Image (tube, helix red, strand yellow):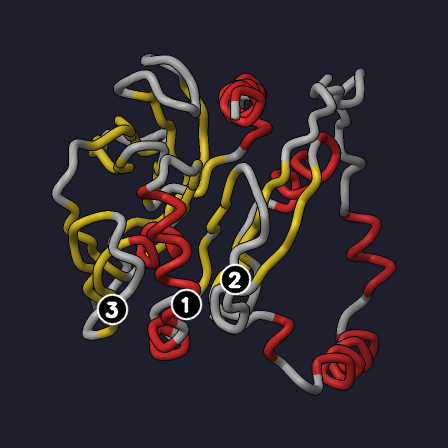
Amino acid sequence: LVQSSEISDLDSDLDYLAETLSKTVDLDQLQALMRTPRLPEKPLNPELPETNLRIAIARDKAFSFYYRENLELLESCSRVIYFSPMSDHELPDCDLIYFGGGYPEVFRRELSENKKMRYAVKEYGEAGGYIFGECGGLMYLTEWVEDSPMVGIFKGKCQLTKSLQRFGYIDLELKEDCFLGMKGTRFTGHEFHKSITTVDAPAVYQISKTGGLDNWTCGFRYKNVIAGYPHISFLSNMDVLKQILRWVQKDSSSV
């Protein structure tokens, strides 16, 4: 995968594609074949409480895969601070850290060499700070990605593979109470990764393939840190996001 932000001449490439399509495709006929989408009768109204929570979200070349709606929802109810685990040397003052997916394996040298950030994240988690990680976030929070030292909150190693290990939409259920919700809470998301990770901890997620027969477990917990390969969608169950906000707000208010 190559992201748009990594293509220096993207605009000229798009212009070339547009010109080629206009000469080779009957765009009027293509549009005539399209159907008007059916929209919900009522617009989405998440009714999220406004909070004074400070949520630090990792966002750089190594961490860039997020559901856009997740970020917009968090921005609507809290103060979001974006930071770079690759180049920043200090964590923002925050109540929760969110590590999304991306390419930590590609940038593992840079992530590993930024020892100040790795140590800061480790100390934050050991002190009871809230951290949520998805896919690349899980990889970063383990001890190793290949031969590169990482944060080490979870005891284990991430090993790259030549083929996809998981791909597609999934249904998740919490196996225990945690800051994502109570045991039995259900939500949806997806997995897409070409790596395997061994972590010495019980799994938090019971997962099934959407529309399929496969079942497996994933997601790990240490103190107030939860991370797994799944990218979860807050829109699939807004109670998950509300639970996160309530749980973290309760702890931040008692400090």
Query: Which comes sooner in the sequence, label 2 or label 1?
Result: 2
Q: Residue at x 77, y 45 (%)?
A: 34
Query: Which amino acid, mark 1?
Result: Lys
**Circle 3 crowding by C-alpha within 10 Å: few under 14, some 14–19, many from 20:** many
> What residue sits right under mark 2 in the picture?
90
Q: Answer above or below: position of 233 versus 153.
A: above
> From mark 3 to mark 2, how far is it between C-alphas?
18 Å
Type of amino acid at the residue the image marks with label 3: Pro
Query: Given this view, does label 3 or label 2 mark the residue nearer the observer?
Result: 2
Q: Residues within 10 Å of mark 2 (few under 14, many from 20)?
A: some
Which residue is located at x 37 percent, y 35 percent?
128
Tell me if residue 240 can be seen.
no
**In-front residue for pair 28/20:** 20
* Residue 255 image offset from top left, x and y in percent: 52, 26
Q: Which is nearer the N-term, disc 3 or disc 2?
A: 2
Q: Position of residue 176 (x, y in %)?
A: 28, 18
Foreground residue among 17 and 159: 159
Give the answer, above or below, for where 208 lies relative to 150.
Answer: above
Crowd band around label 1 with a 10 angstrom C-alpha radius: few (<14), some (14–19), many (20+): some
Q: Is residue 33 above or below residue 91?
A: above
Q: Is residue 183 left or right of residue 83?
A: left
Question: Which residue shows up at 49% across the image and 23% down it?
Answer: 251
- Residue 116, disc: 1
Asked whether residue 56 is in view, the answer is yes
- The answer to whether the residues at label 3 and label 1 have Cβ atoms under 8 Å apart is no
Q: At label 2, which amino acid type do we have? A: Glu
Marks 2 and 1 in Cβ contact (< 8 Å)? yes
Residue 196: image location, x then y, percent = 20, 56
Q: Which residue is mark 3?
A: 149
Sequence-wise, which precedes: disc 3 or disc 1? 1
